[in-house]
Image: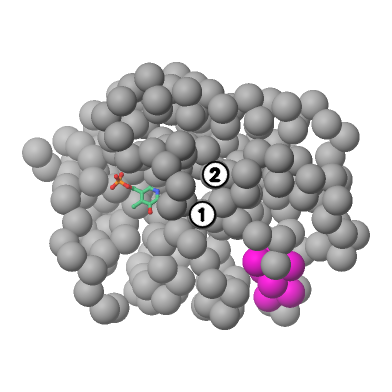
Amino acid sequence: MSLEQNLADLQKNIPSGCILIAVSKTQPSERIMEAYQCGQRVFGENRAQELASKFEKLPTDIEWHMIGHLQSNKIKYIAPFVALIHSVDSLKLLEEINRQAKKVSRVIPVLLQVHIAEETSKFGFSPDEITDMVESAAWSGLKNIQVRGLMGMATFTDDEQQLRREFKTLRSLFDQLKGLPLPQQVAMEELSMGMSGDYKLAIEAGSTMVRVGTAIFGERQPLKKV
Ligand SMILES: *Cc1c(COP(=O)(O)O)cnc(C)c1O
């Protein structure tokens, strides 16, 4: 199926309150431009340098999201322009993003990544750690950060029951945090969950942002250097 058809199908399945992030990692600029010509403006990448080089080449009205694990020493490449960092998985990283944001006089919107997968290999805070972090971090020193919500990745499985359970866990945590007295820099507005294989279940569970790559662009080519 054509990219145009894929995007049209997705738009049909995604409610208006939910944002479609086109995950363009490993895709060349020409493919991104095809999606852009179809009206897609929000793109997600998982490597900082690849993100920065695409930002430089592509139209300036694209909103770039960082969705992959981010190393502290790579923040500087994306700090000047990134629209949302989904993958904050430690307080140390949050503090470093704050430092780099300050340098470029920005407030950078981020999501806190929560470990919801029943498998063990994914990055992120545990639900308990998130609650502790929100309550105890030295927020007065984090003026250049705006936490907009949570992000999670479910287990890579076909087991719908398990996927529903994991998404529901994340949604409950999100709702629970919403009910707490939160620091000024923390708002629970966005819940980023759902990928090509599981976005429908994620939406049913209350996702506000789905990150979809393969279902738009087709299978990815093996990683190559950019
Ligand atoms: C690659 C990736 C996606 C998209 O995966 P698809 O299965 O291709 O839709 C979503 N989220 C993250 C964090 C990713 O790295």
Judge by depth and name the residue closer to the eye, 54 or 77: 77
Q: Confirm or deny contact between disc 2 and disc 1 (CB under 8 A).
A: yes
Span colored in magenta: 93-100
Of the pair 152 and 60, the residue shown nearer to us: 152
Question: What is the x, y in percent for residue 27?
Answer: 24, 62
Rendered location of residue 116, percent (x, y): 52, 38
The quarter of the picture where the C terminus appears is: bottom left
Question: Up-down: is 117 above or below 57?
Answer: above
Find residue 32 and report its image quarter.
Answer: bottom left
Q: Amino acid at mark 2?
A: His
Residue 209 shows up from this direction: no
Q: Which residue is mark 1?
A: 123
Q: Amino acid at mark 1?
A: Phe
Locate residue 179 relative to residue 18 in the image: left or right: right
For label 1, the SS is: loop
* Numbered mark located on residue 194 in the image: none
Q: Estimate the x, y position of residue 61 in percent, counting from the top left.
A: 46, 58
Label 2 C-beta lies within 8 Å of the nearest ligand 1 atom = no
Image-quadrant location for residue 174: top right
* Side (left or right) of 141 relative to 109: right
The percent position of residue 87, horizontal first and vertical second, equals 54, 55
| Element type at mark 2 | loop
Going from the N terminus, do you reach mark 2 or mark 1 first? 2
For image coordinates 26% across by 64% down, the residue present is 26
Which residue sits at x=23%, y=40%?
215
Q: Is residue 51 left or right of residue 218?
A: right
Q: Is residue 125 above or below residue 1?
A: below
Magenta stretch, main secondary structure class: helix
The residue beneath circle 2 is 115
Magenta highlight on residue 98: yes
The residue at 16%/62% (across/down) is 221
Q: Residue at x 87, y 65 (%)?
A: 141
